Structures are given as C-alpha cells and as structure tokens.
Image (cartoon, rainbow, N blue to C red):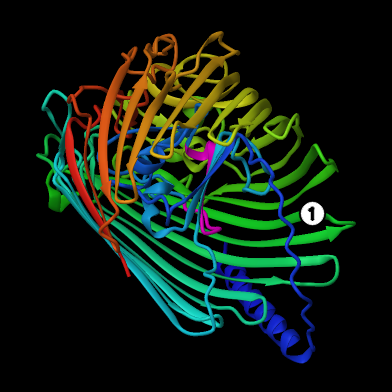
Amino acid sequence: MNSKLFIASFLAIGLSATTALSATTKEKIYKLPTINIYATKPNSVSSERIDLKENYTIKPIANSVDYLKNLTGITASRMGGHGLEPTIRGQSQNQLNIISDETFTHGGCPNRMDPPTAYSSVESYDSVTVVRGYQSVLNGAGGAGGSIILDRKKPQLAKDVQVTSDVTSGFDGNSGMDYYNTNALAGNDFAYARGAASYKNSGNYKDGDGNTVRSSFVEKSGNLILGFTPQDAHIYFGVEQNKIEDSLFAGSSMDSPISDGKTYRAGIEKEFENGALSKIDLSAYASLVEHLMDNYSLRAATGMRMRADSESDTYGAKLKTDFNFSDELVKTVLEYKSNNRDATRKQGMTPTTVTNLQSILWPDITTEEMSVALETTKDINYNNRLTIGARYDYVVADFGKANQISSVTSLSANNLYNTYYGYTASEQKENNFGGLARIEHDLTNDVMLYSGLSRSVRTADATERGMASYSGMGGSQSWVGNPRIEPEKHHQLDAGFRYTQSSWNVDISAYANKVSDYILKDSARGQSGILVNSPNVTVYRNVDALLSGFELSGSWDISSSLSLNSNAVYTYGENESDNSVLAQIPALQGSIGAEWRVEDYLKFGSDVRWAAKQTRVDTNRLTGSGRDVAKTGGYAVLDLNATLTKLKPVELTFGINNLFDTKYADHLNRSSISDPTEIQVNEVGRSLFVQGKVRF
C-alpha cells in the first residue's frame, strides 16, 4: 500500500469528525425519556467474552497467550519464554484473526518468534473475546479457525473530572520474572486520556526435570489514547509500542536481540437516534514491526555467523455501519488492509563481518485485501433467531525483490521457486467469497440449541507464498514458499447447545470442517506439484483436508462459597488427499478447577490441567511432512492459588503452579528457519508466584 491511501483515510476520519460535530451543533436535538427493556438472550456457545478489568490475571504472565491458553479451546506452541503461538480447532497463524482495538498486526519474524499476540499486553485491555470457529463475517478476512479480539472501550464518565488508576506487580519464582504494570484514566463526559505501561524482566525457566530452558526476555510496553465524546460521538487517537529485547529461544537456532512493534490508530464513532442509519464507525491504523534475530549475540557462536533483519508493515482502514430496517439490525463493513514484509539473512565469519547477503527470506511481499461484508440477525419468533452473512475479499499479492540475487549463493527467490515448483513469482489476484447461516432455537427457558453452516476463504501469508530461505549443503535444508499457492476454502458445519440453570450450566459444541486447497507445510519428496526429491527441504502445496472435533465446558455453584468448572477440547485432523494424518493437531485436553470463597476476604483456587496422549502423528519427512517430533505423552498438572480481597484497595494473590514439578510438553512444536528439524520445548516446572494489585 502506498502512504497516500493511508493519509487519505486519516483525512476522511477528520472530515467525518468535523461533519458529525457540525451537525450536532447546528441541529436542535430533543431527547425523549429512556425506555429500558430487559431480556435475557443466551450467548453463543462458541464465543466467550472475558471482562479483563474484573477478571484480571491472578499470576504474572510472560505474554498474552500465557493468559489466553487457560481459556476453553486455546492451546499454544512454545519456542521460548515469549512469543507463544495460539491454536484454535487445530488452526493457527494466519488461520486465526488476532484483532487488537480494530487493528491487525503481522509479526516481523519469518520464524514466528513474534506472532501478533506478542505485541498485545493483555493487562492493558478491557475485554478479550475468543471466537471458536467461523461465527461472523465481520471479523476480517479468513479466520476459519476463530478469532481473538482484544478491546478497549470508550469509558463511561460523568460531567465532573474523574481520575482512576491501578498498579500491579508480581514475581515468578521459577524464571525469576519480575513484572510491573499500571493503567490510568482521567477525563469527563467530553474528553479523556487513558494510558498504560508495563515492564517484564524474565530469566530462563526450568522444566520439571530441573533442566534450564533458554527462555529469558525483557518486555517494555506502553500506550496512550486521547478521546473526545461530544454529542453521541467518540473521536480517538492512539499510539502504542511493545518492545521485546534479548529474547532467548530454545526451539530455534537463533535468538532475538530486539522485536519492536508500534501501532498508530485513529477513528470516530457516531450514533444516530433517527433514520435507518443508527451507527457509523470509521477507523484507520498503521502497525509497524521491526525484528532482528541472529545466532551469535545472545549465544555462544559456532560456525558461520548469521543475522536476519526483517520488517512487517500493516496499514488498514475500516468503515462499519449499523442500519435498522423494519426493526432488524443490519451490520456492514468496508475494509482495506495492506501488509508488506521484507526480510534478508546475511552471514560472515565474525560478528563484525555479517554483511554478505545469503538469502532474501521475504522478497518484499505485499498483500492487499479489499473487503465488503454484511450480516444480520433476524428474530423469526420468540424462540428462534437466524443469522446470515456474506463476505467478499479481493486480494492482490506481489513481490518486489523476487529477482534480487544473493551475493553468497548467486540465487534469487525466483530461482528457488522455479527449482521446486517450475514457475516464478508474479502478481496474484483472488476473488474470495464467504458467508454463513446460523440458527439458534430456545428449546426451553434453560436450553438453547444452535446449528450453523459457513464458508470462509483464507489467503496465504507471506511465508507460505514466498519464503526463500536457502540453507544447508547445496540447499538441502531450504525453506521455499509457493508463489502460486491457492487460498484455503473452509466449509464448516457446527452445532451445539447450552443448558443453563441458576447454579450450573453446560456448553457443548461440535464441528466438521472440509477444507479445499488446505495449505500444507510439507517436505519435498517429488510428490505432485513438487519437482525435487529432497525431504529436508520445506515446501508448500494444496491438499484436501478434514478438521473436526468438539468443545465441552461447564460450571457448578455448589454453594455460595464453593464452585467447580471444567472443560475439554478435542480436534481430529486428516490429510484426505494423501490419506494421512495432519501434523500439529493438539491432543484431547482440558482442565478441572475449583474455587472456595471465605466470605468476602479470601478465595482459594485449584486447577488440574491435563492432556491425553497424542498418537496420531506425522513424524517422517520421507513419507510425510515430518512436522511432529514424536508421539506426545499425556500429563496432569496441579496449580494452586489464593487471593486476599479484604485488604481493599489492595488485592494480593499468591500460589504455586505445577505443584508436583511434572516434566511435560504440549504436543505443538516449532521448527527453525535454518534447520527443518522440529523441536519440542518442555513447559515450566514448579513455580511459586506472588502478585499484588492496587486500585485507586
């Protein structure tokens, strides 16, 4: 995207703000008395919204996914102490939409040391919504696996100036991580300012066998939002920075001296009391990421020194509108997003001579998406609701440096593409259509049933489309994207129910997802579409696949002082083109928790996190992708915590995770950009922690 469109988006916001304000000052508005109508509508079984201000994390967390993976349906792969990668319904990376305050961030590391969640400090948000599966056409292009939506809402303030703040500090005894966070808000019903800042300094942690896992990091983050709320309007400007320094990664052949993400955003929301148009929301943003990784500055160097510098810049603009037609709410979205990724790898014999261009990892790949979506929910009658939606995404992808020659290998990205696929990079255009139909039925006042059918289309990301890593003797361990890879088409059927009583509830959902042109990360074995038989080389190709599974959760308030909760999640993955297992599918897993409250001043909590064995694996690069390290054993881990609330405004929490110091690893693992060998990193062993929060 050129910067002119981005500037134009901001000008449009300013123009809209001026128009809205002038309209409110010129017109005489008569306010009628408020009429309140109270009703209870069941929430979606496949969606979970958490109020982070009321349900803040009770322990120090390394990054957002440390918190999110405790929610039903989310698992994570680990490479170190920071940058955990979330997975929902067996899908991850670009198969999920990670949305932070209406913005998208795409990480700057070709090795995914910094997935989008690495640049979101969950402690500074008001809420997080986890959507499992494709439940709305309004949450961005793709998102077949689900969405993670982090929000900061417009504060509700009185006419007089109010000032509120909180300070949180914690310490983790295993990694030695100390953590500090503060949030502040000041303003009235016309203008406000809110900000947050956090600092984390973590050492390496030890697993259940007492082995040190390379995982230390330093994280610094902060954000500032200025807002104005005149006459049913909300105008805001925000800036945010998240910087991660000196990150060590046990699951990679490199570490990261720095990852730096900056986000700039602005927008206007305006509500209207009369007419078909009830709300308009216009926003624009720029998310700029710089990343550096090398194999010598943070670890003992052996052999050739390697350094990879990369950038990922994302620009976007979105117009959301709500219309009321015959008492039916119709939501529409017009959206533009552009992401450019550029990464090179250089080498040298000493740290001061790492100047020779070895590979153009991301050869200046730009992906633009222009989208329109519409969705409405109609009350068929008192007991039945129908949601229908449609989405169209026009995608253009291009390469700016596909012909640039490496000074070390004398090869370009196009040379690699042609060697493995028989064609070179060129501009690719896609017309992607998606939609959904979903019906909810209130069987009784206590039971809600639902069923949905959807189609969603996900375009390839820059790595799948154009990675050009030449490594190993004669390129024997290279990693090569496919410049003509087709987008994934997901066709999902899901169903579920919620049974709710005054003291307990049960949620069950199940799904089947037939995927055409699933983008498979594979080994080069001379199979259809791959011209070279070199199994240690990583390539991409399209296959047909099936993903299916279920999610189960429930809670029971046994008494006013004791409650129980539990959940379980299972995913099945099959490569139907090759009649083989899909790699990197989590095992059956879940948790069982209890909370005991002693009046209003003390809470005790316990959780057992468990996973079954994962025996459906793809471990052999000679016959499959080889992306699974091995079969993974099951485990059960006990966590304990206690919270003192009588000390208000102070809340003090302390506890111990992994009480029995169990050695375990989740099935999901990572591979290194310079070495196709999959590496599974053990989880954290026994850890004592303490955390305090003060509200002012």
Q: Is residue 219 visible?
A: no
Q: Is residue 231 left or right of residue 96?
A: right
Q: Is residue 278 left or right of residue 241?
A: right
Q: In front here: 176 or 429?
A: 176
- The image quadrant of residue 66 is top left
Please identify the residue farthest to the bottom as the structure is shown.
26
What quarter of the picture does the C terminus occupy?
bottom left
Residue for point 57% across, 15% down: 528
Q: Residue 486: give x, y in percent of width and height.
A: 63, 32
Is the residue 74 above or below the residue 649 in the image? above
Q: Residue 457: give x, y in percent of width and height.
A: 66, 36
Q: Is residue 676 left or right of residue 446?
A: left
What amino acid type should be assigned to the residue bearing mark 1? Val
Please identify the residue farthest to the right as the structure is shown.
326
What quarter of the picture does the N terminus occupy?
bottom right
Residue for point 13% across, 23% down: 209
Magenta span: 93-105
Q: In front here: 218 or 448?
A: 448
Q: Is residue 116 visible?
A: yes
In the rendered image, residue 86 lying in the magenta stretch gets the answer no
- The image quadrant of residue 79 is top left
Q: In front here: 693 or 142?
A: 693
Which residue in the protein does label 1 denote? 330
Q: Residue 654: give x, y in percent of width and height.
A: 21, 45
Residue for point 65% across, 26% down: 496
Q: Secondary structure at mark 1?
A: strand
Is the residue 103 above or below the residue 112 in the image? below
Q: Residue 48: give x, y in percent of width and height.
A: 54, 41
In the rendered image, residue 96 lying in the magenta stretch gets the answer yes
Q: In front here: 522 or 618?
A: 618
